[in-house]
Image (cartoon, rainbow, N blue to C red):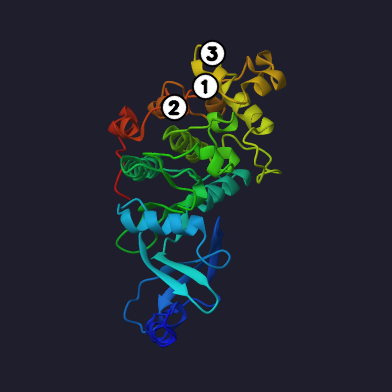
Amino acid sequence: MDYDFKCRTASMRAKVEDLFDYEGCKVGRGTYGHVYKAKRKDGSDPKEYALKQIEGTGLSMSACREIALLRELKHQNVINLQRVFLSHVDRKVWLLFDYAEHDLWHIIKFHRAQKANKKPVMVPKGMVKSLLYQILAGIHYLHSNWVLHRDLKPANILVMGEGTERGRVKIADMGFARLFNSPLKPLADLDPVVVTFWYRAPELLLGARHYTKAIDIWAIGCIFAELLTSEPIFHCRQEDIKTSNPYHHDQLDRIFSVMGFPIERDWEDIKKMPEHPTLMKDFKKSSYQSCSLVKYMDRHKIKPDSRAFHLLQKLLMMDPNKRITSEQAMQDSYFKEEPFPTDE
């Protein structure tokens, strides 16, 4: 490249540090970088923004993927990418987003702490319903546009604070997201590690090579259960989170302890799973005979005849082919009884 042209374009390029104040305002770190709360230096806009600095130097595949997807995606329940800054001096990439004050992880953590201190806070049913409906609306939009999120968990579900969008859910952290209209090779080959274990669907844990929108639906079921009970439904030790082997004995044990062991009548294709022989070697069906989702939710005072339970059951079907879609879930009778879900 012509040296003078390079210098001229570098001097014209907007620098993130010239436009925004963010020093000392770190608010968290995601899978792929650090997040800062930022404000415009010139005072032209009182709004707060989130600046995400991508981990490492240069443009990684995950950063390219996230930028490419977010530039095209526009929905009220998906985080809005405002701008991309490339810092050529230190080869850093910065993404500018709307700032969301809350996330579901912190909201649930607060309720869990209150519960532990014997000061339970009543979570309004309408709030849970509204949060779930907005998550489903965002995922329905992604799935309609051939995008799998693949890393849904409470920490990636943001909730807007004060302002015009107060209470609006925003699905964030698209570093693991994938287009699924024409995969060139099994997705498992590209990224052995997908989705935090607690929210990982059983077909992934059994080594499924080609998986579907149903993995996001399972994760939404886990989040819904957590909103209803303030406890992660499939809580498990996470000591080997970076393992490249999808099979995870302790996580499967936790799922079976809540749901019961899957019988072939309920999940016919379980025999075709790559890790099925390991599963049969490691587990005894008889150990989980007294386990069921009905019993688990009943302990948390969610009755099996409630509409909330019926929807949860459809989201947490062991067989991915029988799992409800986001569109079907949005039409569920749970959302047609009072209190009705709101936009925020």
- Which residue is the site of mark 2? 309
Label 3 vs label 1, nearer the camera: 3
Q: Is residue 261 left or right of residue 267?
A: right
* Disc 3: CA contacts within 10 A as few (<14), some (14-19) or many (>=20): few
Q: Between 59 and 121, which is closer to the camera in this rendering?
A: 59
Check contact, mark 2 vs mark 1: CB within 8 A.
yes
Which secondary structure lies at badge 1? Answer: helix
Q: Residue shown at 68%/30% (left/top)?
A: 249
Q: Residue shown at 44%/40% (left/top)?
A: 184
**Vertical position of residue 167 compared to residue 254: above or below:** below
Q: Is residue 79 visible?
A: no
The numbered mark, 2 or 3, whose residue comes first in the sequence reads 3
Q: Position of residue 309 (x, y in %)?
A: 44, 27
Label 2 vs label 3, nearer the camera: 3
In terms of image quadrants, where is residue 240? top right
Which secondary structure lies at badge 3? Answer: loop
- Which residue is the site of mark 3? 264
The numbered mark, 3 or 1, whose residue comes first in the sequence reads 3
Q: Position of residue 340 (x, y in %)?
A: 29, 38
- Which residue is the site of mark 1? 294
* Disc 1: CA contacts within 10 A as few (<14), some (14-19) or many (>=20): some
* Disc 2: CA contacts within 10 A as few (<14), some (14-19) or many (>=20): many
The Cα atoms of the two marked residues, 2 and 1, are separated by: 8 Å
Q: Residue shown at 43%/33% (left/top)?
A: 212
Q: Residue flagged by tag 2: what amino acid is it?
A: Phe
In terms of image quadrants, where is residue 339? top left
Check contact, mark 2 vs mark 3: CB within 8 A.
no
Q: Position of residue 49 (x, y in %)?
A: 41, 69
The numbered mark, 2 or 1, whose residue comes first in the sequence reads 1
